[in-house]
């Protein structure tokens, strides 16, 4: 019989993290009422007054330059520069599963001029797969806002994997266990592949990559057989170099309405979506967080941001100010359970 004590003994680190994330649920209560009710656009002078400086704003991202999420962030940065009158920069720190970017911002001054824009892997995935992180996903950051969300697509090399549907794919993988490979760049792209193996009873060989850009040539050439990632690989589907099998969500994507979900294909439990959010270093003043929230929320409505959404396969996703901490805590619990179900041990 499973008891709370046995769960604690089996997973003391994860339970401890869960408690700290639960505490994060209280953070929205500390948000000033004024910050939640302001709706009028701020002038550039007001923004600079709230930030307390006319220094450039640097957006630190764990994405390679030119990747779909990087293009999205640069669209936001241009709008922030226009609205604030400040110079904006994008600092790419890819690799290490988003650890490098998160660590850099955790150590920065909390003055509103160094901002982490990251996928949820940094705050909901990494804590469950790394025994020791050089940052605390709750204590080291001030949550600002969610920005976008979307599913991943399973892409296969059509020369190596002749399957055209989920059912054909699982039949092929069961026939030759251990023959086929999947690439991954972080827990976000690894988790659905691990869940596929568990749910469908198949065996794949994992191949790690630093980024999607470095994995793409190997997928197209057949050095690896499949990979879960965002919609940025879609042009290679249109050209016939890759084939899309299914989407990792409980709903079809508006950008590819003919592409089924895994659930529709008979494989349950692969409802793994990702989201992007902005964070400041811990102890950032409330006025600074509020100003940045409004800048980013407005920037996400620009034409450039909407075009980037389409390329990325994401939709606009902006929670009310003060709700990111609680959302992150709930999402981390979901990802923790999924990672345990997938049998992925901490490294």
Image (tube, rainbow, N blue to C red):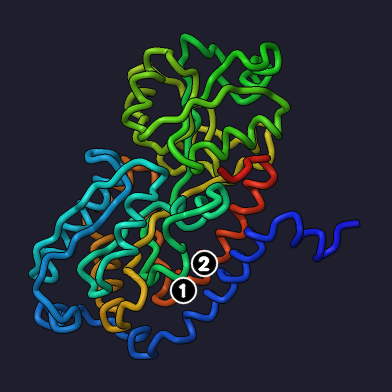
Q: Is residue 275 left or right of residue 37?
A: right
Helix, strand, or loop for circle 2? helix
Please state which of residues 325 and 12 is positioned toward the viewer in this rendering: 12
User: Which residue of the protein is positioned furthest toward the top in this rendering?
Assistant: 159
CB under 8 Å between callouts 1 and 2?
yes
Q: Badge 2: few (under 14), some or many (20 or more) residues near its Cα, within 10 Å?
A: some
Looking at the image, which residue is at 30% across and 76% down? 289
Taking 96 as reference, is 178 above or below it? above
The picture quadrant where one finds residue 111 is: bottom left
Q: Position of residue 121 (x, y in %)?
A: 46, 50
Residue 75 position in % (x across, y down): 20, 53
> On the image, which quarter does residue 41 sit in?
bottom left
Is 96 placed left or right of 108 in the picture? Answer: right
Residue 59 screen position, x and y as percent: 23, 58
Residue 260 percent location from the top left of the image: 56, 34
Q: Residue furthest right?
A: 1
Q: Which type of secondary structure does the marked residue at label 1 adopt? A: loop
Q: Horizontally, is 63 left or right of 326 in the view? A: left
- Vertical relation: 122 (above or below) 227: below
Q: In the rendered structure, find residue 323 and report the number of the disc placed on it.
A: 1
- Foreground residue among 320 and 3: 3
Q: Badge 1: few (under 14), some or many (20 or more) residues near its Cα, within 10 Å?
A: many
Q: Quadrant of residue 248?
A: top right
Query: Relative to 329, does residue 51 appear above or below in the rendering?
Result: below
Residue 105: mark = none
**Drawn side of residue 232 relative to residue 292, left or right:** right
Alpha carbon distance from label 1 to label 2: 6 Å
- Mark 2 lies on residue: 327
């Amino acid at each position: 019989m499973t008891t709370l004590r046995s769960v604690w003994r089996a997973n003391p680190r994860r339970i401890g993290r869960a408690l700290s994330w639960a505490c994060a649920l209280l953070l929205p209560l500390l948000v000033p009422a004024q910050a939640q009710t302001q709706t009028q656009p701020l002038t550039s002078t007001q923004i600079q007054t709230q930030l307390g400086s006319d220094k450039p704003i640097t957006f630190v991202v764990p994405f390679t330059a030119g990747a779909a999420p990087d293009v999205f962030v640069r669209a936001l940065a241009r709008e922030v520069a226009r609205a604030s009158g400040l110079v904006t920069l994008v600092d790419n720190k890819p690799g290490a599963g988003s650890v490098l970017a998160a660590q850099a911002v955790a150590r920065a001054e909390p003055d509103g001029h160094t901002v982490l824009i990251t996928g949820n892997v940094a705050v909901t995935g990494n804590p469950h797969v790394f025994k020791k992180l050089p940052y605390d996903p709750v204590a080291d950051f001030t949550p600002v806002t969610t920005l976008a969300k979307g599913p991943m697509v399973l892409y296969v090399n059509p020369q190596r994997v002749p399957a055209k549907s989920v059912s054909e794919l699982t039949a092929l993988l069961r026939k030759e266990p251990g023959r086929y490979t999947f690439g991954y760049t972080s827990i976000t792209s690894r988790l659905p592949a691990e869940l596929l193996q568990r749910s469908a009873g198949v065996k794949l060989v994992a191949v790690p990559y630093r980024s999607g850009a470095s994995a793409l040539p190997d997928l197209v050439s057949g050095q690896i057989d499949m990979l879960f990632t965002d919609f940025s690989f879609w042009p290679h589907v249109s050209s016939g170099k890759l084939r899309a099998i299914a989407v990792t969500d409980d709903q079809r994507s508006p950008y590819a309405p003919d592409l089924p979900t895994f659930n529709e294909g008979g494989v349950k439990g692969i409802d793994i979506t990702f989201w992007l959010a902005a964070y400041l270093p811990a102890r950032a003043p409330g006025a600074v967080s509020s100003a940045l929230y409004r800048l980013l929320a407005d920037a996400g409505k620009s034409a450039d941001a909407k075009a980037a959404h389409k390329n990325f396969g994401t939709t606009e996703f902006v929670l009310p100010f003060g709700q990111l901490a609680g959302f992150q805590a709930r999402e981390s619990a979901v990802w923790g359970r999924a990672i345990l179900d997938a049998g992925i041990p901490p490294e």
